Amino acid sequence: MNAPLNAPEPARLAPRLVLAALVIAVVVALIAAARREIDRTGPKAPPGAPAITLASLVLVGVTISAFRGVDVRLALFLGAIPLFLISSGLPTMLKRTVAEMANAGTVVPICSAMGFAHVLRLTGCDQHLARLLVRPLRSMRALLIPGGVLAGYLINTTIVSQAATAAVLGPILVPLLAAGGLNPSTAGAVLLLGSSMGGELYNPGAVEIRKLAELSGRTGAEVVARSIGLNLTACSAALLAFWAIAARRAGPQGESVPSLAINPYKALVPLLPIVILLIDGLVGPNPITRPLEGPPKILAAMLVGLAAAALADPAKIGEIVASFWEGAGQGYYHVISLIVCASTFGEGIQRSGLVGLTVHSLAGAPGLAMVAALVIPWALAVVSGTGIAPAVAVMEFFIPEARTLGLDPMTLGTVAAMGAHFGRTMSPAAAVVMMAARVSGGQPRDLLRLVTPPLMIGGAVLLARALMGAR
C-alpha cells in the first residue's frame, strides 16, 4: 500500500497532462466512431468489434499513461468513461463508482487497518516488534540475510503498508546488517524484499484479500488460509535465490550494534488483531467477534488492538484516538481511491465485451489464463509503482469467469495478488523502493538490480505450482 513520497514537479507534470489530453482526444474520436456504428447497426446490437477495439485501445492508453507517470487513479477513471459511454452510459458508471466508494467490504477493513498502523507507530509498538524479530540475528551472522527478509515479511503482516514497514524496520535492521558485513545496497535490498514481496497477504484486512474474499464469497481468513501455500512457495524460492546472490557480496564483519530494550507487551500488540481474526475464521467464533459478521468483525479486532496499544502508553490516549482517525483517512485517500478507480475501470472493460472475448479465447487454454493473471498485474505494478490497482483490476477481470476457464478462483486471485506484489517490489516508481534506499543509503537502481532476478525465479516457481494445481 504505497503512496507517492513527493508530488510531481511541475516540469514533469506538464508532459504527463499533455499525454493524458492526447489519450482523451483519441478516446473521444473512438467514441464518436463507435456511436456511429451503433446508430448504423441498431441500439440492440450486442457489443461487437468497435466496443472491443475501443476497450483494447483504452487498455493500451491507460498502461502508457501509468508508465509515463500519470496518476494511476486518473488514468483508470478517465479510461472508464469511454467504456461506459459505448456500453451502458455514464449513469451506470456513476452508480458503480458510488457503490464502490461506500463499499463496507473494503472501506471498513482497510481504513481500520491503516488507522491501527498509525497507532502502532505513535505508541512505538511497531518498533518493539521489530526489535523482537531482529534480536535473534545478532548472534547468527550466517542468517542475517534470510532473517532480515523474514523480519520484514512478518512485520508487513501487521503494518499493511510496505513503505511504512521499511521505515519501521530499517533503522533497526540496517545497522545490524552493516555490522554483519553487508554494504548499503545489499542491506537495502534485504529490507526491500522483506517489506514488499507478500507478507501483507497474511492479513485478512489487506486490500487484495478483501477483494478476493468479496469476489469469491469467502471470508478473509479463509482466503488467507487458501493462499498460504502459494505465497510461501513463491516467497521461499525468491528468498533462497536472493540469499545465494547476496551472501557472495558480504564483507568482513563490522562493529557490533548495541542491543535495544524490548517491551514484550508492546511487541505483541501488533499481532493481536490478526490472531483474533485468524482464530475466528479457522477455529470458530470467539467472545470478541461472535456477535459480528463481515467487515464489522475486522473493525472490532482493530479496535481491540487500539485499546491494547492505549494500555501500553496511557499518557498518549488523546493522541492515539486522533492518530487512528488520521490513519483511517489516509487509508481512504491512498488505498480506497485506487480500489474505486480500478473497480470502475474493470467494470467498464467487462461491459465492453473484451472480457467475454478473452474468456472465450482462453476457455480451452487455462494455462494461458493463469499466465495472464500473473504477468498482467506484474507488468502494471512495475510501471505504476503500486500493487493495489493492478491486483484489484485483474481480479475483477478474471475471478468472476474463473470457473468458466476451468480454474480455481482462489488460486487465480492469489497468483494475481502475488504478481502485483512482486512487480511493485521491482518498480523504480514504488515508494517502498525509495524508502528502502533512503534508510539504507543505497541507490534504488542497485537495490532493484539485486531483487529482480530472485523475484523472477519466485514468480516462475509460483506459476509452476499454480499450473500443477490447476490440472
Image (cartoon, rainbow, N blue to C red):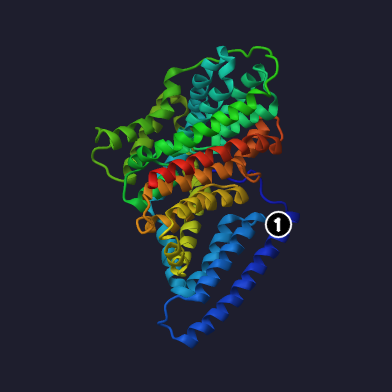
- Which residue reaches farthest bottom? 40
Query: Residue at 48% across / 83% down in the picture?
Result: 38
Coordinates of residue 233 in the picture (x, y in percent): 46, 35
The front one of 73 and 41 is 41
Query: Residue at 45% across / 22% down in the picture?
Result: 267
Q: Can residue 82 be seen in this view?
A: no
Task: Label 1: state its secondary structure.
Answer: helix
Neighbour tally class for label 1: few under 14, some 14-19, many 20 plus, Cα within 10 Å: some
The front one of 39 and 121 is 39
Instruction: Give the residue number, with chain letter if any, for mark 1.
Output: 13
Coordinates of residue 306 in the picture (x, y in percent): 40, 33
Query: Residue at 40% across / 56% down in the picture?
Result: 102
Where, by quadrant of the figure, is residue 446 drawn? top right
Q: On screen, 384 above or below 167?
A: below
Q: Which amino acid does label 1 sit on?
A: Leu
Instruction: Tally the marks.
Output: 1
Q: On screen, 211 above or below 94?
A: above
Coordinates of residue 108 in the picture (x, y in percent): 39, 47
Coordinates of residue 42 in the picture (x, y in percent): 44, 86
Q: On screen, 226 above or below 74?
A: above
Q: Can residue 202 be seen in this view?
A: yes
